[in-house]
Amino acid sequence: MSKPCSKCKGEMSMQILDPFQGEEGGLTLSVQQMPSLICSQGHKRFIHIEFAAQLMDLLASPDTFSSIPSAAKKGLFRKHYHCPACDVELPASPNGLQAMEVVADLPRAEPFKVRIEVPVFQCSGCGKASIHSAEESGRLAFKATEHAYRSIDIHPT
């Protein structure tokens, strides 16, 4: 039995949320079929106290973006990014998106999916798409997850 709703004291029950999304710096993520505790008034709560942080950590992890090639950072004073395949300098701004899906298999929760559209830089030399770095994409995903949580007004307790 879960604790009562902290806002209205109503009974909370486990439900699957409709998809919700967040965006940061061109990276968009859509959380799909995430479990949540919801009361009859529609107040939402994470299924356990660590849940929100666990999802954010998963999406911020450089390992999450390891399937997309990372550019090489070069330059002594002014850094430039170069294609990991042919070493041509990449454009300064992203010129495409690459979609990926992450399965969030978190402790004490049914697995659910997060669809991520990552800004990529298309090489003018060989046409290969890459991200600047997995760490940078992880930072964007972390912030986008914060925005997603706010968009549906979900809380830890």
Image (tube, rainbow, N blue to C red):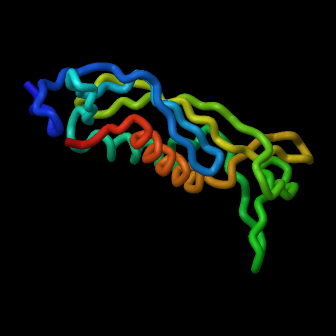
Q: In this view, does 67 lie to the left or right of 85?
A: left
Picture quadrant where residue 117 is located: top right
Nearest the viewer among 101 and 31 is 31
What percent of the width, then of the height, locates residue 13? 19, 21
What percent of the width, then of the height, locates residue 45? 25, 35
What percent of the width, then of the height, locates residue 133? 63, 54
Residue under the image location 7 percent in, 24 percent down? 1
Residue under the image location 73 percent in, 58 percent down? 72
Q: In this view, does 89 lie to the left or right of 94?
A: right
For the question of whether residue 20 can be seen, the reply is yes
Picture quadrant where residue 136 is located: bottom right
Residue under the image location 28 percent in, 19 percent down? 15
Asked if 82 appears above or below 77 in the picture, the reply is: above
- Farthest bottom residue? 77
What percent of the width, then of the height, locates residue 112? 40, 24
Residue under the image location 20 percent in, 25 percent down? 39
For the question of whether residue 102 can be seen, the reply is no
Q: In this view, does 58 lie to the left or right of 135?
A: left
Asked if 112 appears above or below 49 in the picture, the reply is: above
